[in-house]
Amino acid sequence: MKPSRKFEDLVELVAILRKECPWDRKQTHESIKDNLIEEAYEAIEALDDRDFGEFKKELGDLLLHVVFHSRMATETKTFDIGDVIYTLMEKLIRRHPHVFGDTVVDGEEQVSENWENIKLREGKKSTLDGLPAQLPALIRAQRMQEKASNVGFDWPEWKLAWEKLDEELQEFRQALENGDQDKLSDEFGDVLFSLVNVSRYFELNAEDSLRKTNTKFEYRFRYIEQKLKEQDKALKDSSLEEMDAYWNEAKKLS
């Protein structure tokens, strides 16, 4: 078999692997579910790096998981790849009545509002349904806030959201001063949630912003380690002032 651009050839290739490769044949939905998450994060990393060659490969890995899971479901007569495609297309058509129906919208905000209302008519019990508990907390906080905003539960302007952040910061500081350890975690969570809320008003992605800061910190810290290693010194044998000087060097270089 040779590589091609045809989707049906990929489906056939996976079917062959399931029959003839001992490793592929052994897999179950459960055994590779964590790999699906891993591939999604690898795709995000490639996109953040603007490495579109790698991004293309990672999207292929994600597509492989869709086809692989669908093949396993076909073998147990649960569903097949055609069912996956049909279900997706039916949902997209139903949730875009402004494209495939007579609904008129004024802009993207009304599209989002209609989307949430349609989901509720489909049987969702809450606007917040559909957000997995396993999502990273920052992503889940922002998505919950966006969904609530789509149905009108939101501050009218960013300054009011900032006032709420100030309030939560004061409550967190009060818990610190009172030595109230039980309340400290709750108040800190409220601060983070409010900070995420403020970020939305400026179209910032909280998860992306923190990921970039993590990358920045990692680069600068590794720079400190490398500079000290060149002097045959360990971190524990160096002063904070020395490490801070290298930190500032790294800042200038980046």
Image: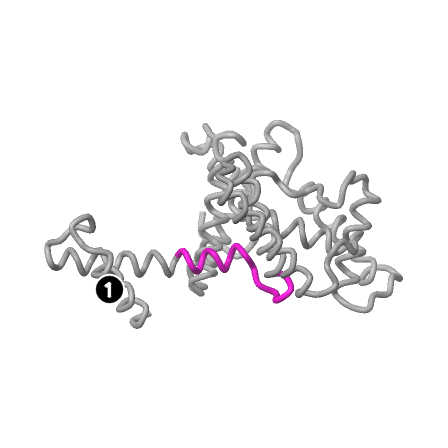
> In the picture shown, does residue 183 fall above or below 5?
above
Q: Is residue 29 magenta?
A: no
- Looking at the picture, tell me which residue is in the foreground, 215 or 188: 188
Mark 1 nearby-residue class (10 Å; few <14, some 14–19, many ≥20): some
Residue 52 seen in the current view = yes
Outermost residue to the front: 178
Residue wearing tag 1: 246
Outermost residue to the right: 102
Residue sitting at 64 percent across and 51 percent down?
143
The kind of secondary structure element at disc 1 is helix
- Looking at the picture, tell me which residue is in the foreground, 81 or 232: 232
Residue sitting at 78 percent across and 46 percent down?
119
Residue 12 seen in the current view = no
Give the quarter of the image for residue 76. Answer: top right
Residue 170 is situated, as x and y percent measured from the top left of the image, at 57, 52
- Relative to 11, 87 lies left or right: right
Q: What amino acid type is highlighted by mark number 1?
A: Tyr
Which residues make up the magenta segment? 200-214
Residue 22 is situated, as x and y percent measured from the top left of the image, at 41, 30
Outermost residue to the left: 232
Give the quarter of the image for residue 50. Answer: bottom left
Q: Is residue 206 magenta?
A: yes
Q: The C terminus appears in which quarter of the rendering?
A: bottom left
- Looking at the picture, tell me which residue is in the foreground, 67 or 40: 40
Residue 180 is situated, as x and y percent measured from the top left of the image, at 52, 37
